[in-house]
Amino acid sequence: MAAPKKGRKAPGAQGRPGRTLALMLIVMAALLGGMFWSGDTTPRLGIDLAGGTTITLKAVAEPGKESAVNETNMNTAVGIIERRVNGLGVSEAEVQTQGRENIIVNIPKGTNSEQAQQQVGTTAQLFFRPVLNVAAGGPVTPEPTASTSPSASPSGKGDDGKDKATAPSGTPTASPTTQGRAVTDALKAPSPTPTGSASNPPAATPPPAPTPDPATAALQQKFTELNCLDKSARVNVARGTKPEDPIVACGKNSAGQWEKYLLGPAEVDGRDVDDAKGVLDPQRGMWIVQMDFTSEGSKKFSKITSKLSQQPSPQNQFAIVLDGDVVSAPQVNQTLSASAEISGSFTQQSAQDLGNILSFGALPLSFDQQSVTTVTAALGGEQLKAGLIAGAIGLALVVIYLVAYYRGLSIVALLSLLVSAILTYTLMSLLGPAIGFALNLPAVCGAIVAIGITADSFIVYFERIRDEIREGRTLRPAVERAWPRARRTILVSDFVSFLAAAVLFIVTVGKVQGFAFTLGLTTLLDVVVVFFFTKPLMTLLARRKFFASGHPWSGLDPKRLGAKPPLRSRRVSAPIDPKEA
């Protein structure tokens, strides 16, 4: 009999299953090590298991502004709602979009659900407020003899509507100034009008400095102590204030540095803006934001810019405040009315983003609450317990079937199930902090269904091997010859399951996505386990006498399977060569 050609594997070639198994074990050890190193040794539980409130919101645009329901505005709304929820002292709250119009808010237990519902359903507010003081984002310890005020250092650029990136950041000084008195007076009145300036020299006998009222002193103290570098401190610092109230707020300049602002009462509402857009100025070769106001908004804007243009820096700035955050603080050097232009260190993206915020007048998306579901931890625990009991019963039935029908082969199936369970648990634990995956009840159902999918792959492979033994082949070549056909069947079956999970994940919203995600994840793991653990382990066991000899308890007994006579015996019974006769 001719030997196989060099460089080609003969049928039944075994490969190197030991290396494949070693690689699989190394990957498992790395994942387990990463899980313990991160400290997240248990999967993150969803609201229905840990307890809490789930709020489903649907975005509704104002009449004539249906285009406002777009990806940019939805993402902006998610950020605003997330800041509001975090402002309630909530930890690990989840706010995410689902589909084109829906926002899902998951709030863990321990939060006032009524207050949370009120906060997340409120439309963001946009206001134009005069800047009374601006300083670096960190806290400042003021001198007891003077109020904190920025040094008057005009930029000297002369450009109309200078963006906040070019505005002076304001270094606090310890000497009293007329600007400090202007700030104090502005805090007392709805429309800030500075009472002192460099052009009005003091009288021969200066009057005593006015004593600020308690509310003004408290606000000044709040501004002094505000630390915008601390995320928890800058979350909705203006919460609970009214448009006619002065506020403190935080904002970033074009260099990405935090600054804090002391702002006067709102002079212009965001809904007074008729249109705004970021455009490229061909003459100056820079991105700018152009604004057009309504007729009423033009009057308001003309009045406030007339006042601001006569003030020194930084009190000639107006802040564009979205939901308590300063998104821009341009300077004003002349009176503006029906239209205005904001220029500065804009990129295309930043100019378009600011134009989008201004154009839609404080994000004109109202939200209808589609559903509010509150689950206690006790109820979630009972449901989880019932689900785990159902899964344990199903797993026990699968094990009984494997042991009774496949006997020794059940060792391979049970070890493969164990590997699949370890990988699933580890990945769920790691995906929690990585992508925010939370294990909810539908996800638990997906994991239970995966037990049957994984067991089905083993059964397909085992039956192919037994078919080869029925044809009269020994175990080692039967294992290799059965693999190509079993592999195709397993891949087709898993592809159908994964496709169904992917479609379900895309077209559904809410908790059903948890089921689809878990089903898809476990289906992919089934392919990995079968290819890199079950197959190499079966190859190694085929070399053991217990399985290779067809022991009655191996599950591969030729007599029990009704095997045909060995192929070699059938070759001997063929017609005898006349020469040998």
Image (cartoon, helix red, strand yellow):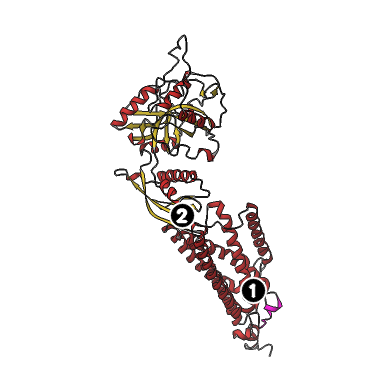
Frontmost residue, 211 versus 511: 211
Q: Quarter of the image holding residue 350? A: top left
Frontmost residue, 14 versus 388: 388
Against 579, residue 194 (above or below) is above
Frontmost residue, 293 versus 218: 218
Callout 1: SS: helix
Give the quarter of the figure containing the N terminus: bottom right
All told, the count of numbered labels is 2
* Amino acid type of the residue that numbered disc 2 sits on in the rendered structure: Thr
**Residue at image location 51% in from the left, 38% down from the top:** 234
Please tell me the numbered disc located at residue 53.
Answer: 2
Task: Tell which residue pokes out farthest to the right in this image.
Answer: 545
Frontmost residue, 319 versus 571: 319
The residue identified by callout 1 is 411
Q: Is residue 315 visible?
A: no
Residue density around tag 2, few if under 14, some if 14–19, many if 20 or more, within 10 Å: many
Q: Is residue 66 visible?
A: yes
Q: Quarter of the image holding residue 17? A: bottom right
Q: Which residues are the magenta region? A: 544-553
Instruction: Classify residue 326 as left or right of residue 524.
Output: left
Task: Tell which residue pokes out farthest to the bottom in this image.
Answer: 581
Q: Main secondary structure of the magenta part?
A: loop
Residue 216 x, y percent position in the rendering: 46, 28
Rounded to the nearest whole Å, what is the CA distance between mark 2 and mark 1? 44 Å
Callout 2: SS: strand
